[in-house]
Image: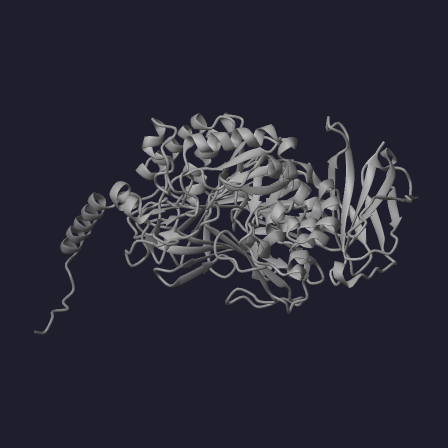
Amino acid sequence: MKQSCRPRKPGEILFLSAFLLAIVGSSCTLEPPLKLLPDKQVKITGGGMTIELHSLSGRVTSIVEERSAYDLLRPWPETDRAAGFGIEIYDELELLSCCDLRDSVRVRNFVEEENSAFFEKLFYRAEYSLKQKVWGDREGVYMSFQASVTDKKAPLRSVRFSYLIPLPKDFYFWVPNGGEPLLLDGRTGAKFIYGPGGEKGASISIPLVSIWKAGGPAFSLAVPLEIRSVRVSFTVEPARLPEGVSPGPAECDWLRITFDLVGMGEGRTLETALWLYAHEDDWRSSLGIFAEKYSDYFQPARRVSAAEGFLSRIVPTGYTNSVLAGLQRRGVKLAKIDWNYYRSGQWVPPQALRFDDFTWTSNTEPQYENISVRLVRSCIENLVQFKLQPVLYSPFNSYCLKEIAGERFADDIAHDEQGRPMAHRAGGLLMHASAAGQFGREMLEQQRRMLDLYPQAEGFFFDDWAVSGIDFAHDDNLTVVHNRAAYSLGGNRSGVGALLVDLVNQKKKLAFATPPPAISECRGIDVLCLAGRDLENLGRIAFMGLSRPIVADLGPETELSAERAEEILKEELLWGVIPSETELSRDSQLDRAYRPLFLNLKGREWVLEPHALGLTPGLKGQVFYIPANSRNTEQDVVVCILRPDLRLADDLQRGGARVRLRLPETEEYVRATLTLASRNPWPMPLRIERKGEEDEQELLFDLPPFGPAALLRLYHQ
């Protein structure tokens, strides 16, 4: 049909206009006009750093380390879009990547207050809102983001939220994993994981990177521990720019800090944050500032001198008085009882609450039969008589026996992405444990029972404190995987696990735990207890023990050659870890050579003064404070020194080694000794050489020839 194109009459036009206006007026609400924002640069300072923000674009245009006046963004020309600090969001549902270094954004509601600014960014390419706050205090400058989808009914989606920071070449890049700093050269990439999923050498337990130039600027970027996260990666991307951004004249590395396994949508908001602070040009200074801010996570709830020493496992039928006396003579302080509970999901048999002679077979150690509350109590009493501190298993578990889980805790069984129960160990299932769930409530009740049944126990051991996984049957309101809400099993530790630790702390008992993936899960833990599998990550784990003891628990089932056993002892000495009695006693020569060195590590704490230790190239070493007397009023200093390529069996000694120490109040240290790992490990006097002015004095030590290891002790007057 042919359409008519005749012109409208004036009356018709007026009628149609009025009709359309009526429709618009009844169906739409016009937003008020946007408030015009001032065009200015806003400075925010704190912790030796200054950040500048542009009010109209919301971009970070300058990051300055104040001591050196170095601007991290200076290598880039002012006209280059990459001159700013960037944010990137990858949306797995929409397969869309948005980055404010290349995509247009709109800034609204910019508010400046005292040393802080608040504003919102809206992406034009996607319906994302970023509510940003930047503020400073004496500890540093902070940037926090609340990311959400503007459509509150939008479906849930997995996202990767990344901070992008350009890094100039010839700076050092360090993470707390026990490795050497990486020199940024524009060609070498690296990736480190905070949380589950990191491989050997690529895992970190503290969400921190430190960047410095020798004798020049030095600063760190960290994720505040108050921020909930599942996994955070720190990636050095060599000379690589975000898509669509042209490199400037001085190409540089990029640091990408990514929050992963999270999401937004369905009204869910994702919160992330970053903390920047300046420090001296080394890693000790950076780590010291972080540990001071979050001292609750690094300091034990209690530090008991009588419980610091070698650990031995006790079997129910093998602890005669002569055996216990021998352990006491050899400096053993801790006695771990592995057989005190029945089975996972039913830690204390209900009959044992009424009859202390009711017997059971330990599910964790099935070779031990006829266990009873009476037998456990008797064992504890004997240990206490020989000044050995008894440590029992806590009821904390991230798994439960299948038959008990199905019968009593079916709603708490963890499921994989296909909806199948997640198996763990022989006959066990992984569990979701919260204070609101039946499994979590049962653990809390069982811990109370153990505290009542065994009041003389010195501590409780939290095994499974490192189990990780993704549970698709539950939702922690944070984890999102493949666009599905999920639960990170690390929440078992931060949730009901933390409540169990509080129960132990309240009774003035020590809380022992296997090393977790993250320092955020260490609050209230008094002692970290290593198993054989932890030795590969010893450097990473050691930094969670800056002020808390770390003891090894390598039982007799761990088969080791003499060569491998010595390698482990040397690494434990380096990182301040107390070995187990089993490790030392399995080889008499290693025992004689190394036990006296470890006896000097009781009460040790890390020295975190900048540039505290210098060693001749080819040596490895670490420096610690230890109590100088029983009252802990003064501190001695010990330096653990290794020759990585020598063994005790080589019967070789090499000279030419020198140690340099930079410590506060060096004049307070008046004498030094050196103990060698050898067949005759006796302390020998060592001459102290002092260099420099009193306020910045160095202590120098020329060491006599030594073999695989040595321990230098500096005595407070």
Q: In the rendered view of the protein, which quadrant contains the N terminus?
A: bottom left
Q: Depth check: 1 or 285 in front?
A: 285
Q: Depth check: 178 or 192 in front?
A: 178
- Left or right of 475? Residue 64 is right
Quarter of the image where one finds residue 581: top right
Give x and y (percent) for residue 118: 50, 40
- Identify which residue is drawn at 36% across, 31% down: 352
Quarter of the image where one finds residue 183: bottom right
**Can the viewer see residue 127 in this picture?**
no
Q: In the rendered view of the protein, which quadrant contains the C terminus?
A: top right
**Can the viewer see residue 28 in this picture?**
yes
Give x and y (percent) for residue 275: 58, 44
Residue that sits furthest to the bottom in the current view: 2
- Left or right of 544? Residue 499 is left
Q: Depth check: 215 or 638 in front?
A: 638
Task: Examine the rendered structure and indicate whether residue 598 appears above or below residue 214.
Answer: above
* Figure label count: 0
Give x and y (percent) for residue 212: 71, 53
